[in-house]
Image: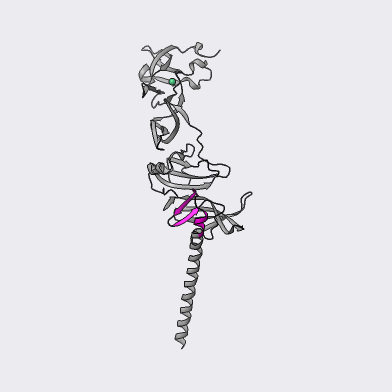
């Protein structure tokens, strides 16, 4: 009898465990099914494995990352208290809600480096091309977000933002390393929504150009001038390595040239211009035979008409030094005058 009693207790215990387990699974899945319908059409959501996580103030979830660690985020005006959930390759930040929307948490930020796909099925490990095909012209190259070694995330050298005019302040940021997605971040932008097409200009005869700055190398920064073609794909108009580049119409023909500071051992500049429909380059030191050269665009005391010129340094055989002023028109070097007080403002 006694052994049977123990057996009964064991059975009851197992039964209880099963009921509890089923109960918790049902709680999670039923919410998932229910909420999928509610949240239809939300671009700012991901699948992490099979789980659906949207950025939404109306999608109340009872469990975020089951069994993973979490920490509290204290209330800080105007934001309510929340939680930070840590999973394998994912971090989710939430606000705690308990009102007519329900009782649970709503998500305002997700950062993922693993097993994650967006609603348009672009995921970690996918190539830039796949991203561009999925998001087309809504994708904006982000120039300002640069990898900081102090950050905990993976190394990246490109960031693209999806944040079209859709009445929300949400965004998706895709972080890429060597044209492969290494991290996806979704968030409510609050007072800062990234992805503004701020630095779009015309250059080298092309409209809608933006500058993409990559890694620093021994030859300078890896700088690309890009544009988006009709199919929504990014095309590179010009790629170069330089300390910096700037866009100036130096020969005043209506086409903006790219002037680069490309000096490695000695100060030097080069100009890219559109000549006969082709992008051509002229190296100032090479063309002038000078020891050094420098663009006069930043020379505040130069007369305005010389600020599209280059100063070039020479040394004669007897050791005397001279500075000459040159201009570049259609990628040809034109001598202007010796550098003297006449070039400077009185
Ligand atoms: Ca020009």
**Farthest residue toward the bottom?**
1
Figure quadrant of the C terminus = top right
Which of the pair 81/16 is nearer the observer?
A: 16
Kindly tell me whether residue 210 is visible in this rendering.
yes
Near-viewer residue (249 or 56): 56
| Position in image of residue 156 (x %, y %) | 42, 42
Classify 259 as above or below 211. Answer: above
Q: Is residue 123 above or below residue 253?
A: below
Question: Ligand 1: which quarter?
Answer: top left
Tell me where residue 58 appears, x and y as whole percent: 56, 54
Q: Is residue 164 left or right of residue 157?
A: right
User: Relative to 251, does residue 106 appear above or below in the rendering?
Assistant: below
Q: Position of residue 161 (x, y in %)?
A: 47, 41
**Count of picture labels:** 0
Magenta segment: 34-54
Asked which quadrant contains residue 223, the reply is top left
Q: Please name the residue shown 51% across and 37% down the image.
A: 196
Instruction: For residue 147, say whether it is visible.
Output: no
Provide residue 287's location: percent of width, then percent of height.
Answer: 36, 18
Q: Residue at x 53, y 43 (%)?
A: 166
Decide whether residue 298 is among the magenta residues: no
């Amino acid at each position: 009898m006694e052994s049977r009693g123990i057996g009964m207790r064991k059975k009851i215990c197992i039964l209880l465990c099963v009921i509890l387990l089923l109960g918790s699974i049902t709680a999670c899945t039923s919410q998932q099914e229910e909420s999928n319908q509610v949240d239809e059409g939300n671009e700012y959501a991901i699948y992490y494995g099979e789980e659906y996580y949207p950025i939404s103030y109306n999608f109340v979830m009872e469990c975020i990352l089951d069994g993973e660690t979490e920490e509290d985020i204290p209330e800080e005006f105007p934001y309510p208290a929340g939680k930070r959930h840590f999973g394998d390759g994912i971090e989710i930040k939430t606000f705690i809600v308990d009102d007519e929307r329900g009782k649970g948490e709503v998500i305002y930020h997700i950062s993922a480096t693993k097993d994650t796909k967006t609603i348009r099925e672009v995921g970690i490990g996918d190539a830039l091309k796949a991203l561009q095909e999925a998001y087309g012209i809504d994708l904006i190259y982000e120039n300002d977000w640069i990898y900081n070694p102090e950050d905990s995330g993976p190394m990246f050298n490109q960031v693209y933002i999806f944040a079209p005019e859709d009445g929300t302040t949400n965004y998706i940021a895709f972080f890429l390393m060597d044209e492969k997605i290494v991290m996806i971040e979704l968030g409510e932008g609050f007072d800062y929504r990234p992805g503004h097409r701020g630095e779009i200009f015309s250059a080298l005869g092309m409209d809608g150009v933006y500058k993409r700055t990559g890694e620093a190398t021994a030859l300078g920064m890896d700088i690309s001038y890009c544009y988006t073609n009709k199919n929504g794909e990014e095309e590179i108009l010009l790629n170069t390595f330089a300390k910096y580049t700037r866009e100036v119409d130096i020969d005043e023909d209506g086409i903006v040239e790219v002037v680069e500071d490309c000096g490695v051992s000695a100060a030097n500049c080069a100009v890219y211009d559109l000549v006969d429909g082709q992008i051509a380059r002229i190296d100032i030191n090479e063309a002038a035979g000078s020891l050094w050269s420098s663009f006069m665009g930043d020379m505040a005391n130069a007369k305005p008409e010389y600020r599209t010129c280059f100063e070039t340094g020479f040394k004669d055989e007897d050791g005397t030094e001279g500075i000459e002023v040159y201009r570049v028109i259609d990628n040809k070097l034109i001598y202007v005058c010796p550098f003297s007080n006449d070039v400077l403002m009185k």
